[in-house]
């Protein structure tokens, strides 16, 4: 049997599985193409003089969203620990760009049922997002990406996992296997049992939520470490490579500090990430120390 | 070098001297067979800075940026002020890797906080980086860096773009290339800001039942409509077609769910291009769209040109099998115009055959066209396919097609393409949910 036939048979089996599983989840409404509240915030943001009070009123209409935004503005990463008390203040502290992306992250989280596994997952994403933003603000790394992009990327990078966990009961096992895999690509392990992988789903989801193209491209390729080669800008744009490497390092700092969501991805990528970011052992030790306060919430 | 003129605000080379220096360095690089790089830097939102701090304040800031550039990179490159808020750095012996590293260093230097009276501001910049190519003139070389800088700006600023990673005007037909670039930017803008829409055109049988709706892409940027005939070729050339195609998959699958939840269980047909189907990840993306929309694959149909079905590349054939296996149906679009080998038609995994408008337009007066359509309808039916006629605009055409026993028709005679809301109303008014 040639490779194509194998792929076809394999995919046929997977497809039937997908279909039967979809039957049971059709009551779900799917992931919206773009949540209405995000749409309204986006429209207001694009005006020459956005009306912060109106934006605050739109956001405050959803108590959980308002609370989530205030909580993000109060995180140590933004340096206003405990002093932000209103949505209005949060918008001013975060800036509309980050606020809008943080809102997108909060809405995404709300689309999924509250389970222990998913809550842990979202917490880890939030931690990695904050560390990514913090790393991007440093001036001693070898690649430049805007902190707001790094933050958003961290927030959304693994959202495909949440979609798959929610859709397919067997995905948890696939995830465990992929997390333990030391040699093959994470996405390759997913594809042995799923018709697609979380990077493709995350890339498409963020694309449809109108996040910048470089972000969705970075999400789609975030396990393709061979594309991060320092001396080859033709594989991926520098910005995209920077996002992937920074978030990978952020995930490593997060996992090292918290001991949560252990994967083998840093072992597979550290050489190329550290080279791209121009981080030597001494600087890495400094990052371990200086990154810790951002993660106190997860202790 | 001829005498250089210095810009009084910054102490850097002025525009004229920059251009002169670039020409000289290009000649030298060619002579010595050494790389030469240019970094074109444009401060973001400088107009706002001038408005906020006045022109003196703006000049102060320009001067601070110039000092930072000099301090950081003067030993590696020659620096000049090319316009009010733009600088260029020219570095001989800089290859792309070194230039990129320098670019990152400059971005960081510009980003350092800056105090203006009581305010602390943080500047950002857009940067284009180009390395001299063989037989390139100084102006072409600078122009590439300028284009890349503009790309960086249009992508939101605060980033650098390396020339070659975007569509670049060719030496031949530079005007067309620029138009293409403009359309490409518009497409990027549309993708990033919601300027794309799928309009849907119903396909009906002769009893008026809706068989399916076909999604047709529309692009509007800043209130201006860009016709598909203009943006599709650019999307194909630039590779954006894959993104546009994925966007269609996402929208089409969601629309199918939306209609099905409203009790209007109508198949949604989505066009797929060669660029998409030749991508090894196409099937994964289709699966992902179906999972995200949480829709039954049976409610989705993909329309492909007949030549794509005949493409015997492994990737295309594997994608076709996977699509069929997952329960998504396939339609041959615009049949009869691709000069396919009819012998291969029997192996095509499609369940629907759509006759191109070129044949329909000639009906019913042209008896030869009638004969061709009759033969194609017979062929399609013998192969077990549903046969649809596209581009039906008149009652006479509709009646001729009914006589020829076509299964369904699509065209202005019954309905134009409609936006989502108009379609829902149209379907509800026709009681489409009852007719299925």
Image (cartoon, rainbow, N blue to C red):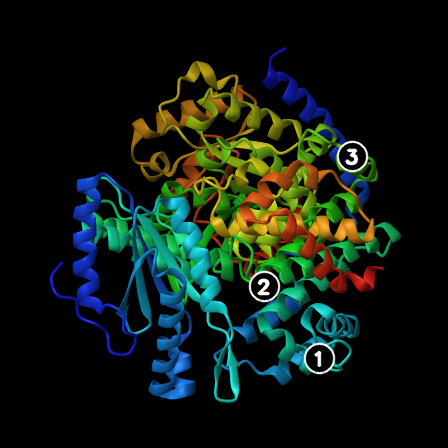
- Which mark is nearer the camera, 1 or 3? 3
The tag earlier along the polypeptide, 3 or 2, is: 2
Q: Quadrant of the C terminus of chain A?
A: bottom right
Label 3, label 2: how far apart the Cα atoms are = 31 Å
Q: Are marks 1 and 3 in contact (CB under 8 Å)?
A: no
The residue at the point 36 percent across, 56 percent down is B128
* Observer-nearest of A181 and B269: A181
The residue at the point 40 percent across, 69 percent down is B68
Residue, far left = B2
Q: Is residue B239 left or right of residue A201?
A: left
Q: Is residue A86 left or right of residue B21?
A: right
Have a look at marks 1 and 2 and say if they share a chain: yes
- Which mark is nearer the camera, 1 or 2? 2
The residue at the point 48 percent across, 47 percent down is B244
Residue, far top = A1
- Disc 2 crowd, CA 10 A, few/some/many (<14, 14-19, 20+): some
* Observer-nearest of A87 and A167: A87
Residue B269, relative to residue B430: is it above or below?
A: above
State the residue position of label 1.
A87
Which label sits on residue A137?
Answer: 2
State the residue position of label 3.
A180
What kind of element bears circle 1? helix
Residue B8 in the image: state x and y as whole percent: 24, 78
């Amino acid at each position: 049997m040639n490779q194509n036939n194998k792929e076809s048979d394999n995919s046929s089996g997977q497809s039937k599985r997908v279909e039967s599983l979809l039957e049971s989840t059709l009551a779900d409404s799917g992931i919206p193409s773009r949540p209405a509240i995000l749409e309204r915030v986006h429209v207001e943001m694009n005006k020459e003089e956005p009306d912060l009070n109106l934006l605050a009123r739109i956001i405050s209409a959803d108590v959980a969203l308002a609370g989530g935004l205030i909580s993000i503005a109060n995180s140590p990463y933004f340096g206003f620990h405990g002093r932000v008390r209103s949505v209005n203040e949060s918008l001013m502290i975060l800036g509309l760009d980050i606020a809008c992306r943080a809102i997108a992250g909060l809405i995404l989280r709300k689309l999924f049922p509250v389970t222990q596994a998913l809550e842990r997952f979202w917490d880890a994403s939030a931690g990695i997002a904050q560390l990514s933003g913090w790393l991007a603000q440093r001036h001693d790394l070898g690649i430049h990406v805007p902190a707001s992009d790094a933050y958003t990327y961290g927030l959304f990078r693994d959202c495909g996992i949440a979609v798959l966990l929610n859709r397919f009961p067997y995905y948890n096992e696939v995830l465990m296997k992929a997390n333990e895999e030391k040699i093959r690509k994470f996405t390759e392990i997913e594809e042995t049992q799923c018709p697609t992988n979380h990077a493709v789903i995350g890339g498409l989801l963020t694309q449809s939520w109108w996040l910048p193209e470089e972000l969705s491209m970075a999400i789609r390729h975030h396990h393709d470490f061979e594309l991060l080669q320092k001396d080859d800008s033709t594989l991926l744009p520098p910005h995209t490579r920077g996002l992937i490497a920074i978030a990978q390092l952020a995930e490593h700092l997060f996992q090292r500090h918290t001991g949560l969501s252990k994967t083998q991805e840093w072992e597979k990528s550290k050489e190329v990430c550290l080279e791209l970011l121009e981080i030597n052992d001494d600087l890495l030790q400094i990052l371990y120390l200086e990154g810790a306060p951002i993660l106190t919430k997860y202790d | 070098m001829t005498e250089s003129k210095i810009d009084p605000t910054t102490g850097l080379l002025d525009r004229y001297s920059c251009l002169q220096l670039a020409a000289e360095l290009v000649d030298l690089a060619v002579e010595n067979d050494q790389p030469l790089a240019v970094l074109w830097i444009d401060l973001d939102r400088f107009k706002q800075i001038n408005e906020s701090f006045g022109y003196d304040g703006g000049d102060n800031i320009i001067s601070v940026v110039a000092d930072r550039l000099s301090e950081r990179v003067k030993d590696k490159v020659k620096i000049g002020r090319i316009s009010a808020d733009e600088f260029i750095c020219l570095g001989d012996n800089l290859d792309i890797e070194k230039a990129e590293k320098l670019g990152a260093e400059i971005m960081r230097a510009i980003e350092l906080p800056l105090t203006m009276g009581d305010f602390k501001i943080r500047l950002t910049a857009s940067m284009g980086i180009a390395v001299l190519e063989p037989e390139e003139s100084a102006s072409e070389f600078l122009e590439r860096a300028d284009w890349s800088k503009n790309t960086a700006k249009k992508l939101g600023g605060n980033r650098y773009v390396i020339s070659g990673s975007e569509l670049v005007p060719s030496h031949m037909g530079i005007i067309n290339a620029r138009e293409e670039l403009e359309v490409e930017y518009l497409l990027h803008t549309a993708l990033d800001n919601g300027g794309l829409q799928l309009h849907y055109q119903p396909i009906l049988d002769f009893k008026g039942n809706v068989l399916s709706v076909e999604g047709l892409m529309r692009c509007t940027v800043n209130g201006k409509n860009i016709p598909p005939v203009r943006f599709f070729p650019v999307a194909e050339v630039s590779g954006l077609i894959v993104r546009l195609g994925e966007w269609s998959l996402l929208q089409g699958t969601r629309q199918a769910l939306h209609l099905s939840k409203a009790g209007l269980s109508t198949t949604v047909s989505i066009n797929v291009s060669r660029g998409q189907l030749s991508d090894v990840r196409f099937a994964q993306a289709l699966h992902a769209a179906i999972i995200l929309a949480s829709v039954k694959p049976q409610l989705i149909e993909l329309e492909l040109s007949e030549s794509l079905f005949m493409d015997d590349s492994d990737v295309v054939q594997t994608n076709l099998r996977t699509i069929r296996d997952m329960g998504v149906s396939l339609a041959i679009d615009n049949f009869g115009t691709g000069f396919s080998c009819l012998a291969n038609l029997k192996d095509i995994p499609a369940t629907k055959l759509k006759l191109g408008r070129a044949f329909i337009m000639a009906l019913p007066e042209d008896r030869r066209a009638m004969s061709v359509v009759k033969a194609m309808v017979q062929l399609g039916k013998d192969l077990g396919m549903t046969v649809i006629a596209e581009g039906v605009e008149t009652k006479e055409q509709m009646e001729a097609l009914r006589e020829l026993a076509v299964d369904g028709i699509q065209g202005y005679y019954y309905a134009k393409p409609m936006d989502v809301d108009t379609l829902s109303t149209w379907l509800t008014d026709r009681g489409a949910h009852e007719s299925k």
